[in-house]
Image (cartoon, grey):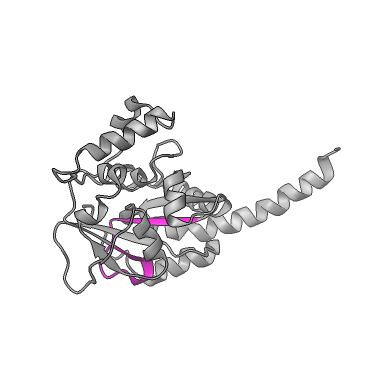
C-alpha cells in the first residue's frame, strides 16, 4: 500500500476539523498485509464494510479480517476480498437484484475501482487516534463542508481527475488511493448502514496527500467566508426579484 508515514498525527485531524467545523470524526483506514498486534480485533458481525466506518467515527480503533466483510458482496468486490466457496453466488445474487430493479447496469461493474490485492486485515480508527499510519482517510459532513475540502484538494494539486463518485460508496477508497482525493455522493446502502444524513457527502483522501491538503484548508475556508459576503452583497444590490 502507499507510503503514508506521519499522517496519523492528531494535529491533522484537529486542523481540518476545526477549519471546517466538522462534527463527525474522520476515519483512517489501513489495508494491512498481516493481522496487527496490539490492536483489538473486531468481534461480532456487521452487514457491510462501511458499517465499520460508523464504529470508527464513534471513537473505536480495531481491525477486521476478510471474513468480517463477507456479508457485503459488493464491498468485498471493491476490497478485492474473495467470498468463501460456500458463498460465491452472493455477489451474482446481489448484482442480479440491483440490475432487476434498475439500480445498476451489469456493464458498469467492470468500471468499479478495486484494491489491487486482498488485505489480510483492515484497520479502522478515528484519524487522530489511529494506531498505524493509514492508507486512506474518510471525511463526511453537510455538503458545504466536503465542498471546502475538495476545493483544498484542488488547490493542493491532489484532487483526482474523476467525476463525482456514487454507488457503491466503498469504491471511493481504492479510487482515492489510485487517483487522488475524490468526492462521493454515497449510496443508499451506505447511508442506511452508517446513519449518514441525506445532506451529507464524503471526501476520501489518500494518506500521502493529507498533509498537503490540510495545509490549504485554512486558505480555502477563509476565501469562502470572504466570497460569501461578496456574493451576498452582489445579490442584495443586483437582484430585482
Q: Residue furthest bottom?
A: 38
Q: Residue at x 36, y 33 (%)?
A: 97
Q: Is 17 above or below relative to 107?
A: below
Q: Residue furthest right?
A: 240
**Which stretch appears magenta?**
124-140
Q: Quadrant of residue 220?
A: bottom right
Q: Residue at x 37, y 67 (%)?
A: 126
x and y, in percent, of residue 216 in the image: 47, 57
Q: 233 or 163: nearer the eye?
A: 163
Q: 111 or 88: nearer the eye?
A: 88
Q: Quadrant of residue 96?
A: top left
x and y, in percent, of residue 73 in the image: 28, 43
Is there any visible trace of residue 201 in the rendered image?
A: yes
Q: Residue at x 40, y 36 (%)?
A: 162
Q: Residue at x 34, y 72 (%)?
A: 129
Quarter occupied by the C terminus: top right
Q: Is 92 above or below relative to 46?
A: above
Is 31 placed left or right of 172 in the picture? left
Is 129 one of the magenta-colored residues?
yes
Q: Quadrant of residue 159?
A: top left
Is 156 one of the magenta-colored residues?
no
x and y, in percent, of residue 4 in the image: 26, 59
Is there any visible trace of residue 112 in the rendered image?
A: no
Amino acid at each position: 500500500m502507499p507510503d503514508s508515514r506521519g499522517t496519523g498525527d492528531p494535529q491533522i485531524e484537529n486542523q481540518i476539523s476545526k477549519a471546517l467545523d466538522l462534527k463527525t470524526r474522520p476515519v483512517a483506514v489501513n489495508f494491512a498485509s498481516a493481522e496487527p498486534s496490539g490492536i483489538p480485533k473486531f468481534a461480532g458481525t456487521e452487514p457491510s464494510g462501511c458499517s465499520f466506518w460508523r464504529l470508527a467515527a464513534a471513537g473505536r480503533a480495531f481491525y477486521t479480517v476478510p471474513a468480517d466483510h463477507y456479508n457485503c458482496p459488493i464491498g468485498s468486490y471493491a476490497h478485492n476480498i474473495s467470498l468463501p466457496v460456500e458463498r460465491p453466488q452472493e455477489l451474482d445474487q446481489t448484482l442480479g437484484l440491483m440490475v432487476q430493479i434498475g439500480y445498476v447496469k451489469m456493464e458498469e461493474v467492470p468500471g468499479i475501482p478495486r484494491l489491487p490485492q486482498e488485505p489480510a486485515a483492515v484497520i479502522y480508527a478515528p484519524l487522530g487516534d489511529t494506531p498505524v499510519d493509514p492508507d486512506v482517510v474518510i471525511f463526511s459532513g453537510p455538503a458545504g463542508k466536503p465542498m471546502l475540502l475538495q476545493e483544498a484538494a484542488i488547490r493542493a494539486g491532489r484532487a483526482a481527475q474523476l467525476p463525482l463518485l456514487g454507488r457503491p460508496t466503498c469504491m471511493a477508497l481504492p479510487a482515492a488511493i489510485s487517483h487522488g482525493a475524490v468526492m462521493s455522493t454515497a449510496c443508499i446502502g451506505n447511508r442506511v448502514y452508517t446513519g449518514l444524513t441525506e445532506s451529507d457527502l464524503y471526501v476520501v483522501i489518500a494518506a500521502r496527500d493529507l498533509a498537503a491538503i490540510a495545509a490549504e484548508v485554512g486558505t480555502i475556508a477563509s476565501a469562502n467566508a470572504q466570497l460569501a459576503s461578496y456574493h451576498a452583497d452582489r445579490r442584495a444590490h443586483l437582484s430585482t426579484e
